[in-house]
Image (cartoon, rainbow, N blue to C red):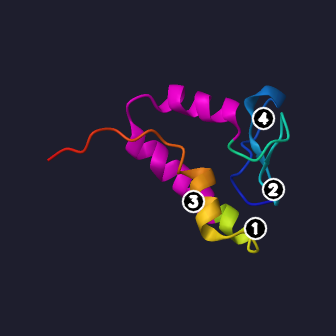
Amino acid sequence: MTEGAEPPGARVDEHVPTTPGWSCGSCGEEWPCATKRSRLLEEYGVDRAMLSVYLGSCLAAASEDLRSTPVTSLQDRFIGWLPRGPRRG
């Protein structure tokens, strides 16, 4: 298991990743699953930069475990779903 993927004391309904396959420990879907995505958006609120940093670190760890998966597929899976806000000029 990749260190830090599953927090100590995590509950079954927290939708944490199981490694090395990076599937959701609760529903079995690819992580981050739809439920976890929704929860992450709620948890991080308007701080999308920190959410991006967190998901980027997950992407880096997953790319080590899922070496045969195309990088663009992993990028879409981990960060491609993030809503994009208006650019600041």
Magenta span: predominant SS is helix
Name the residue tied to disc 2.
19
Q: CA distance from mark 4 to mark 2?
A: 16 Å
Check disc 2 and report its element: helix, strand or loop.
Answer: loop
> Mark 4 is on which residue type?
Gly
- Mark 1: amino acid: Asp
Looking at this view, is 44 or 83 the one in front? 83
Within the image, what quadrant is residue 76 found in? bottom right
Residue 58 in which image quadrant: bottom right
Identity of the residue furthest to the bottom in this view: 68
Membership of 2 in magenta stretch:
no
Q: Earlier in the sequence, mark 1 or mark 2?
A: 2
Do tag 4 and tag 2 residues touch (Cβ < 8 Å)? no
Which region is colored magenta?
A: 33-60
Which residue position holds label 4? 9
| Residue at the far left in the pictured view | 89
* Secondary structure beneath label 4: loop
The disc, 1 or 4, on the residue closer to the chain's N-terminal end is 4
Residue at image mark 3:
75
Nearer to us of marks 3 and 4 is 3
Marks 1/3: CA–CA distance? 14 Å
Residue ID at (53%, 56%): 56
- Check whether the beta carbons of the residues at disc 1 and disc 2 lie within 8 A of each other: yes
Judge the density around disc 2: few (<14), some (14-19), many (≥20) Cα neighbours within 10 Å. some
Q: Position of residue 1 (x, y in %)?
A: 81, 59
